[in-house]
Image (spheres, helix red, strand yellow):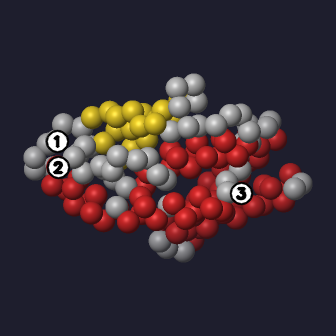
C-alpha cells in the first residue's frame, strides 16, 4: 500500500469515527473533524512508516468479541450499583499465552486487551509476554468472568 493510500485510509476512517462520535454534521464539527482526522492520519502514517504498527488480526477472533459485548448492558448496571455501595475492586492475573514476536501474536495481544475492556466492569491493564499472564482489574470481582476472552 502506498503512503498516500494509507494516509487516505486513515483519514477516511478517523473522519467517519469523528462524525459518528459527535453525532452531527454541523459545519464547525465537520471542519474540526477534518483537522483532527488529518492530524491523526499523519501520526498513524509516521508510526506505520517506522515499522511500529506491525500487527495482524485474524477473522476468527471476531467470533470472540460477542462475549464482552454481551456483558456491556449487565455490567453497566453493576457499575451503576457500585456508585451506591462502593466495591473493593481487585487486580487479577489471568493465564494468557501471548505467543512470540510475529505480527499475528502482537495482534492477538492487542485484541486481548481491547476486547475484554469493552465491558465497563473489566479493564485489561497489561499482557506480559514473559510470564504468559494478563493483569486485569475487575471493579466488582464477584461479577467478572474467570477467562480473558
User: Where does the image place residue 90, in percent across and percent down from the top left?
Assistant: 27, 34
Residues 64 and 15: in front is 64
Residue 82 bears which disc, if any?
A: 2
Q: Earlier in the sequence, mark 1 or mark 3?
A: 3
Residue 28 in sight here: no
In the image, residue 28 above or below residue 111: below
Residue at 61 percent of width and 46 percent of height = 108
Secondary structure found at label 2: helix
- Judged from the image, the secondary structure of the residue bearing numbered disc 1 is loop
User: What residue sits 40% from the left and 47% below the top?
Assistant: 147
Residue furthest to the right in view is 2
Q: Which mark is residue 10?
A: 3
**Residue mark closest to the camera, 1 vs 3:** 1
**Labels 1 and 3 touching (C-beta < 8 A):** no
Is 12 positioned to the left or the right of 80 in the image? right
Inter-mark Cα distance, 3 to 2: 38 Å
Q: Are marks 2 and 1 in contact (CB under 8 Å)?
A: yes
Picture quadrant of residue 47: top right
Q: Which mark is residue 47?
A: none
Task: Characterize the local packing of mark 3: few (<14), some (14-19) or many (20 or more) Cα atoms within 10 angstroms.
Answer: many
Distance between the Cα atoms at labels 1 and 3? 40 Å
What x and y, as percent, mark residue 73? 30, 65
Q: Residues within 10 Å of mark 1 (few under 14, many from 20)?
A: some
Q: Nearer the viewer, residue 75 or 92?
A: 92
Residue 58 appears in the rendering: yes
Label 3 sits on a secondary structure element that is helix
Q: Which residue is mark 1?
A: 87
Amino acid at each position: 500500500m502506498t503512503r498516500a493510500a494509507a494516509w487516505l485510509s486513515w483519514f477516511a476512517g478517523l473522519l467517519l469515527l469523528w462524525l459518528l462520535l459527535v453525532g452531527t454534521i454541523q459545519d464547525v464539527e465537520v471542519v474540526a473533524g477534518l483537522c483532527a482526522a488529518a492530524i491523526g492520519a499523519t501520526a498513524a502514517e509516521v508510526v506505520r512508516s517506522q515499522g511500529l504498527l506491525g500487527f495482524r488480526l485474524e477473522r476468527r477472533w471476531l467470533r470472540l468479541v460477542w462475549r464482552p459485548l454481551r456483558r456491556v448492558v449487565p455490567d453497566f448496571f453493576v457499575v451503576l450499583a457500585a456508585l451506591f455501595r462502593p466495591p473493593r475492586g481487585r487486580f487479577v492475573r489471568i493465564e494468557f499465552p501471548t505467543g512470540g514476536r510475529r505480527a499475528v501474536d502482537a495482534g492477538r495481544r492487542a485484541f486481548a486487551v481491547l476486547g475484554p475492556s469493552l465491558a465497563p466492569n473489566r479493564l485489561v491493564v497489561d499482557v506480559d509476554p514473559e510470564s504468559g499472564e494478563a493483569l486485569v482489574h475487575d471493579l466488582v470481582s464477584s461479577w467478572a468472568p474467570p477467562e480473558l476472552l
